[in-house]
Image: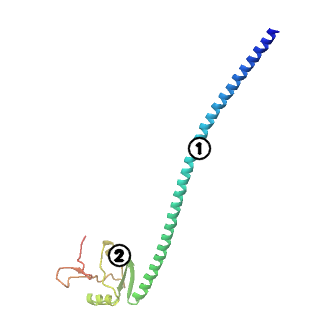
Amino acid sequence: GATAGSRCYRVTVVCVVLLCVLLMTAVIVLWINFNILKTEFNLLQTSNNNLTKERDQLQTSYNNVTMERDQLQTSYNNLTRERDQLQRERDGCLNTFCDSNKGKCFSFRSSLYFMSNEEKSWTESRQNCRKRGAHLVIINSRKEQEFISKQKVNNRVQAWIGLSDRDKEGEWKWVDGSPLTTA
């Protein structure tokens, strides 16, 4: 009896010890898995936070670019309207200023030119320009000079320019009083 009881006791102790070892092993495995999952969760959380920040920055950048595009579109529309208005005004000036029976009108950059087909002296031409609220041409660049030189009225390329030495012989000045410069 005593040996059977002691054997039963030993089997029970061995089973309990094995059960404790198994439980301890299960707890350790679960604890390790928990820590691995916790680390992965933290990494995913950090990655998610970084991606959220990046998305927010991209959204802000997109909003800024959209606003800038809208401002540029508004500016473009305003400039287009202004250009169209200036073209209408220029065309109106051409029609008002120029009598096609008396000469030819043309424009270069922002200037309007009228070349008369009537032959007049420099003084008469200057007075004619003044009556129109204008002046004889003042040439400001080589390109402007080349442009004017190519204009023809009645197959001639003669035109008075607004340069004279009337005030002092040999001292050339434009009709606006500025001195002649050569470059």
Q: Please give left or right for residue 180 compared with residue 12 in the image.
A: left
Q: Please give left or right for residue 40 compared with residue 135 in the image.
A: right
Question: Looking at the figure, which quarter contains the C terminus?
Answer: bottom left
Residue 112, horizontal then vertical, whole percent: 37, 81
Q: What residue type is disc 1 on? A: Gln
Q: What's the residue at 52%, 66% (across, down)?
A: 70
Q: Residue furthest right?
A: 1
Tell me the SS state at disc 1.
helix
Q: Mark 2 points at which residue?
A: 147
Up the image or down, 36 lies above or below 131; here it is: above
Mark 2 neighbour density, 10 Å: few (under 14) some (14–19) many (20 or more): few
Q: What's the residue at 44%, 85% (across, down)?
A: 92
Up the image or down, 24 lies above or below 152; here it is: above
Residue 138, horizontal then vertical, whole percent: 29, 79
Q: Please give left or right for residue 84 compared with residue 7 in the image.
A: left
Q: What residue type is disc 2 on? A: Phe
Query: Which tag is nearer the camera, tag 1 or tag 2?
Result: 1
Residue 152, horizontal then vertical, whole percent: 36, 81
Up the image or down, 24 lies above or below 129; here it is: above
Q: Name the residue under label 1.
A: 45
